[in-house]
């Protein structure tokens, strides 16, 4: 009997191996015949196309690696597998995929470990920049959903530490720089829709609460009723869905237009072709619908506004700023936006030509305590000004 059972197990294992091998061979044949895709809308990333066979690539092993990546990326049914993998992990109680928590009704990106050395270096550099350019300067470091929406994190997720890191950074700034503790403002509105469920950005409502605090620090008061809310999408699925393969969750994107909104023109990267809006409707037909704000990230954006203000604002920023700027339009004569990750020109000349009176550093916690590009731009400006 034992020999018979063992024989049946061997035959079953052999049959399973044959079926699995057949599926893989069939998949390989279909993949060879089926046209390659350049981009995955589900994962929002480029895909490996069939690699060109060259002697050098064979010798260094890159062809084999690229071939493996090609088979993985182009495997027929990959998108279905991607979503099924998420459902399996979610159903078996797995709390995190890569650096994304599978939270309660939301995907939440894990906060990066604090980089105290880099944060201190940035505090010193911002202080040196302010000393060399003594403009009305503010800093706003925005906590992520991992800090504000801790009630949505899965059980046993580690506590957030972003606020302590931000507080420590602010304590290193001089008193004549406005250190805006927006975390407490966001926590007061914790039960509201301030962060997307499928994306790492804050929503326009979260950006409104921050804009209100910033403008108040500048002597200007705004109210929610000053703006008209316009839903532009109810099908947004963001970066965190692309990382995890999440299903069922989706977000709404709103834009807010001030009832006293001025006429304005927006110029991107000095291209000389201004447009009369900060919104990009075409982005609503792309995977990353958050790009409805400015069409994404550019090195330099300049907004000239038809207002009576004498204030000219310079913003150093990451993508969190894109959805907050809509609330600032009525209150400045011009707004100059620099993304240091892509900017390599002379800030000194820009400050002079745009007649800058105010400076705002606006970043989310994760990017501010990892990215070093701001240091390069500020140090270059200081050196240029000292020559």
Image (cartoon, helix red, strand yellow):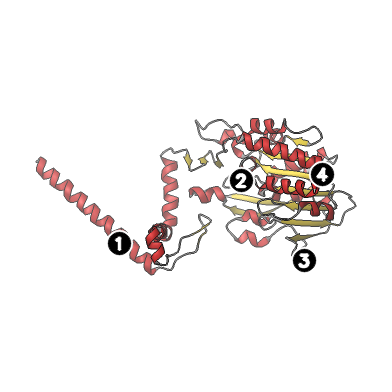
At x 56%, y 41%, the residue is: 108
- Which SS class for mark 4? loop
Left or right: 369 in relation to 93: right
For disc 2, the marked residue is: 196
Q: In the image shown, does 27 or 84 lie closer to the viewer?
A: 27
Q: Residues within 10 Å of mark 3 (few under 14, many from 20)?
A: few
Q: Is residue 232 visible?
A: yes
- Which SS class for mark 3? loop
The earlier-in-sequence mark between 3 and 4 is: 4
Residue 305 at x, y percent in the picture: 84, 56
Left or right: 69 in relation to 166: left
Q: Which mark is residue 375?
A: none
The earlier-in-sequence mark between 2 and 4 is: 4
User: Foreground mark, 3 or 1?
Assistant: 3
For disc 4, the marked residue is: 133
- Which SS class for mark 2? loop
Residue 302 at x, y percent in the picture: 77, 57
Q: Are marks 1 and 2 in contact (CB under 8 Å)?
A: no
Q: Which mark is residue 272?
A: 3
At x 60%, y 35%, the residue is: 114
For disc 1, the marked residue is: 25
Q: Are marks 4 and 1 in contact (CB under 8 Å)?
A: no
Marks 3/1: CA distance?
A: 55 Å
């Amino acid at each position: 009997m034992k020999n018979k059972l063992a024989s049946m197990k061997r035959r079953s294992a052999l049959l399973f191996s044959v079926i699995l091998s057949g599926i893989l061979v069939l998949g390989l044949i279909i993949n060879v015949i089926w046209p390659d895709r350049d981009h995955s809308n589900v994962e929002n990333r480029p895909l490996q196309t069939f690699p060109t066979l060259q002697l050098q690539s064979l010798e260094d092993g890159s062809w084999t690696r690229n071939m493996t990546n090609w088979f993985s990326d182009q495997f027929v049914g990959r998108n279905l597998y991607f979503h099924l993998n998420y459902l399996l992990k979610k159903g078996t109680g797995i709390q995190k995929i890569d650096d994304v928590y599978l939270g309660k009704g939301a995907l939440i990106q894990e906060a990066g470990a604090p980089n105290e050395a880099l944060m201190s270096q940035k505090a010193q550099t911002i202080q040196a920049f302010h000393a060399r350019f003594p403009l009305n300067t503010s800093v706003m470091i925005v906590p992520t959903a991992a800090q504000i929406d801790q009630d949505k994190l899965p059980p046993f997720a580690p506590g957030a530490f972003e606020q302590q890191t931000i507080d420590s950074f602010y304590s290193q700034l001089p008193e004549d720089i406005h250190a805006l503790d927006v975390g407490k403002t966001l926590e007061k509105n914790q039960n509201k829709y301030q962060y997307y469920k499928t994306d790492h950005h804050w929503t326009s409502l979260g950006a409104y609460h921050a804009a209100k605090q910033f403008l108040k620090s500048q002597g200007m008061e705004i109210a929610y009723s000053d703006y008209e809310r316009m839903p532009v999408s109810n099908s947004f699925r963001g970066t965190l869905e692309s990382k995890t393969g999440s299903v069922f969750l989706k977000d709404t994107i709103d834009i807010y237009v001030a009832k006293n909104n001025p006429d304005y023109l927006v110029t991107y990267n000095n291209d000389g072709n201004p447009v009369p809006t900060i919104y990009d409707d075409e982005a609503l037909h792309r995977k990353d619908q958050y790009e409805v704000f400015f069409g994404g990230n550019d090195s330099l954006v300049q907004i000239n506004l038809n207002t009576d203000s004498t204030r000219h604002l310079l913003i150093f920023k990451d993508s969190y700023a894109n959805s907050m700027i809509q609330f600032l339009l009525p209150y400045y004569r011009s707004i100059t936006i620099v993304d240091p990750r892509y900017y390599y020109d002379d800030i000194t000349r820009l400050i002079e030509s745009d007649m800058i009176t105010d400076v705002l550093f606006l970043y989310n916690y994760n990017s501010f305590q990892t990215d070093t590009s701001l240091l390069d731009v500020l140090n270059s400006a200081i050196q240029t000004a000292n020559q």
